Image: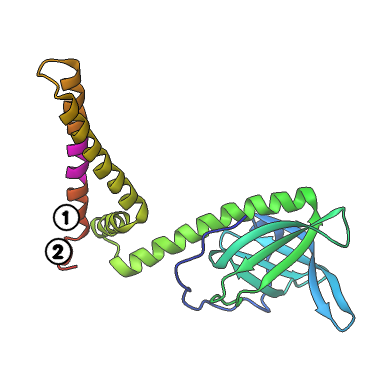
């Protein structure tokens, strides 16, 4: 499943490679998966103990009693988690973790294989964890940029909403609707007290409320710099 990329690369964190990965109870999910690798003999599948945390995927050698971490993926740096039928063994399914080019993993794809049911469960849990990790990173970026003030955060969110294409599409639709209502009203020329008059009055009221809301959102979103933006 394709996932929305993070907006920017995070600050460098402590490198976990070579550290113990902890016990199975420390993870949301732990499995022994076969990792695709390349050596002098060609493509090989190496057993790895893979653990899913709230913010990372970590793996170590399956037979390492110390469980020393070989590598890890920050979930906020993932752009896709995909299932794919294994070409060598039809009874197995590959699960692929793709990362951002600008992340610590450099855009690498990590390929593991396991049973189809286990691959499906991994994809579901990873997608859920990635969404939460990216939301947490976005929230942290917003707080770093706009501060921890609730008022400032709401204003920043309003600015993002006001500048979004979705809001502009809705605004364009309302403008077009208002024009069509005016044209239709001129053609009908409803008299006061009639059902047609009440219908057009209601439509104008709804359109006026929306434009008022649009104006208020605009004012609030751009009030931080005295409307100089």
Question: Reading the chain from its start, which is encountered first: label 2 or label 1?
Answer: 1
Q: CA distance from mark 2 to mark 1?
A: 8 Å
x and y, in percent, of residue 39 in the image: 84, 81
Colouring used for the render: rainbow
Q: Residue at x 21, y 37 (%)?
A: 207
Q: Residue 187's quadrant in the figure? A: top left
Residue at image point 16% right, 60% down? 223
Residue 167 lies, in percent from the top left, at 32, 50
Q: Is residue 208 left or right of residue 24?
A: left
Q: Is residue 103 left or right of residue 165?
A: right
Residue 190 drawn above or below residue 176 = above
Mark 2–mark 1 CB contact (< 8 Å): yes
Q: Nearer the viewer, residue 77 or 217?
A: 217
Magenta segment main secondary structure: helix
As displayed, is residue 179 above or below residue 80?
A: above
212 is within the stretch colored magenta: yes
Q: Position of residue 62 (x, y in %)?
A: 81, 67
Residue density around tag 1, few if under 14, some if 14–19, many if 20 or more, within 10 Å: some
165 displayed left or right of 218: right
As drawn, which residue projects farthest toward the front? 187
Please tell me whether mark 1 sits on a helix, a strand or a loop: helix
Horizontal arrangement in the rendering, residue 219 relative to residue 118 (left or right):
left
Q: Which residue is mark 1?
A: 219
Q: Quick one: 165 or 86, which is closer to the camera? A: 165
Magenta-highlighted residues: 206-213
> Which image quadrant: the N terminus?
bottom right
Task: Tell me, for residue 227, which label it has, or none.
Answer: 2
Picture coordinates of residue 114 (x, y %)? 80, 57
Q: Quadrant of residue 86?
A: bottom right
How crowded pointer 2 is (Cα within 10 Å; few <14, some 14-19, many 20+) is rated as: few
Check disc 2 and report its element: helix, strand or loop.
loop
């Amino acid at each position: 499943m394709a996932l929305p990329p993070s907006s920017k690369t995070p600050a460098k964190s402590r490198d976990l490679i070579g550290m113990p990965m902890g016990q199975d109870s420390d993870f949301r999910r732990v499995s022994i998966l076969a990792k695709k690798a390349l050596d002098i003999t060609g493509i090989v599948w190496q057993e790895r103990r893979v653990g899913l945390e709230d913010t990372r995927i970590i793996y170590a050698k399956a037979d390492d009693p110390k469980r020393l971490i070989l590598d890890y993926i920050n979930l906020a740096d993932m752009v896709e988690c995909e299932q794919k039928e294994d070409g060598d063994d039809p009874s197995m399914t590959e699960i692929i973790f793709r990362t951002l080019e600008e992340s610590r993993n450099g855009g690498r794809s990590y390929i593991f294989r396991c049973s189809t049911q286990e691959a499906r469960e991994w994809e579901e849990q990873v997608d859920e964890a990635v969404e939460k990790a990216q939301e947490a990173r976005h929230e942290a970026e917003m707080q770093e940029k706009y501060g921890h003030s609730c008022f400032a955060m709401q204003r920043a969110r309003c600015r993002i909403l006001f500048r979004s294409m979705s809001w502009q599409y809705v605004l364009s639709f309302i403008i077009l609707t208002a024009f069509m209502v005016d044209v239709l009203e001129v053609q009908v020329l409803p008299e006061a007290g009639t059902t047609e008059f009440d219908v057009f009055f209601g439509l104008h009221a709804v359109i006026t409320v929306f434009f008022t809301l649009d104006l208020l959102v605009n004012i609030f979103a751009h009030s931080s710099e005295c409307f100089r933006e």
